[in-house]
Image (cartoon, helix red, strand yellow):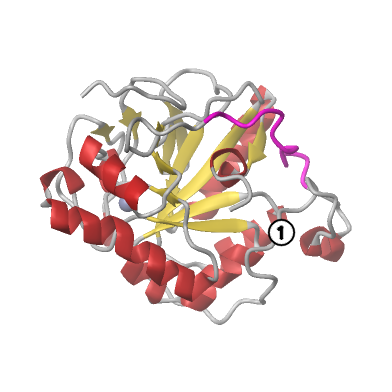
């Protein structure tokens, strides 16, 4: 089970829960706090102000930033410049790379937001105001439940990637089920959001050789885990200090805005910026 990692990465268990609806857990996922999904009643929202779908991020490319143009603040101080060197992501045989931490020396970390249960317009407004990149890993039903909200995240410099259909523990699923859970959302999301997802995150961090093989087969560039997470607005990293390439997991929950702010505060304190995961793992896609 010790995987030959070609891209990144540390062989320590991921912290943090990714728990909605699920009961299965294993050693790779060590929830720090039991934040029950039952407390997260899905909300709905009005259609957000829409910007360009799949727009490039602000600042880094020198393009016009519709966020800062409304605030006159310019790009956010924590916006990372483009990557200095992109990590070489080589497939391990026919398996997609498993990325827990991006292999980079840039002082950059990445924000990833999972599942999609709570869709809070105020949190979306906050993301729009920040103008910082983030990546959403959504389950298919929650993506289909509110496409206008998710298009709003695209306008807020968010990227949309996949996180199965039913949030299953893929290690306990048949190969046929794994294939459907991993591959079907890519086609669905391409239809909904105008971009075929390039990254896949398995629920509970439960990857396997089979998961990686199937993910590569249906076109993903990498299977993405994480090195830190927030629970109850507290950021917990696997190591004491932030490290270049850290990937932080949060969820679409009632605490999202505070969770994001906790990450930004930590990044600012330790001299890190916020990068776009796809710039490193899926350049140009
Ligand atoms: Zn999840």
Prevalent SS, magenta region: loop
Please tell me which residue is depicted at 16% across the width and 58% down the height of the picture: 177
- The answer to which quarter of the image holds residue 78 is top right
> In the image, what residue occupies the spot 55% across and 53% down?
257
Residue 38: horizontal and vertical position, in percent? 25, 60
Corner quadrant of residue 269 = top right
Q: Position of residue 210 (x, y in %)?
A: 21, 41
**Residue 95 magenta-highlighted:** no
The quadrant of the rendering that contains the N terminus is top left
Which residue is located at x 46 percent, y 27 percent? Answer: 7
- Magenta-drawn segment: 76-88
- Whether residue 117 is visible to the viewer of this picture, yes or no, is no
Q: Secondary structure at mark 1?
A: helix
Please determine whether, in this image, residue 115 is positioned above or below residue 202.
below
Left or right: 216 in relation to 53: left
Q: Crowding near pointer 1: few (<14 within 10 Å), some, many (20+)?
A: some
């Amino acid at each position: 089970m010790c995987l030959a990692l070609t891209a990144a990465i540390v062989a320590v268990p991921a912290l943090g829960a990714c728990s909605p609806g699920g009961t299965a857990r294993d050693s790779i996922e060590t929830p720090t706090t039991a934040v029950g999904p039952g407390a997260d009643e899905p909300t709905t929202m009005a259609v957000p102000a829409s910007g360009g779908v799949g727009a490039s991020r602000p600042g880094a490319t020198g393009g016009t930033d519709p966020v800062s143009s409304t605030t006159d603040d310019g790009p956010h101080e924590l916006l990372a410049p483009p990557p200095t060197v992109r990590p070489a992501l080589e497939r391990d045989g026919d398996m997609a790379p498993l990325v827990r931490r991006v292999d980079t020396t840039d002082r950059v970390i990445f924000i990833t937001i999972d599942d999609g249960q709570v869709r809070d317009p105020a949190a979306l407004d906050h993301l729009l105001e920040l103008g910082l990149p983030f990546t959403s890993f959504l389950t298919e039903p929650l993506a289909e439940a509110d496409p206008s909200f998710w298009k709003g995240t695209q306008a807020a410099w968010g990227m949309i990637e996949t996180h199965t259909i039913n949030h299953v523990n893929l290690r306990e699923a048949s190969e046929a089920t794994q294939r459907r859970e991993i591959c079907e959302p890519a086609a669905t999301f391409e239809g909904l959001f105008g971009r075929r997802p390039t990254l896949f995150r398995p629920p509970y961090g439960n990857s396997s050789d089979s998961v990686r093989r199937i993910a590569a087969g249906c076109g993903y560039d990498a299977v993405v885990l994480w090195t830190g997470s927030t629970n109850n607005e507290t950021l917990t990293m696997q190591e004491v200090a932030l490290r270049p390439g850290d990937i932080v997991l949060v969820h679409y929950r009632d605490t999202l805005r505070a969770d994001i702010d906790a990450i930004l505060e930590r990044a600012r304190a330790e001299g890190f910026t916020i990068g776009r995961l796809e710039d490193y793992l899926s350049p140009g896609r």
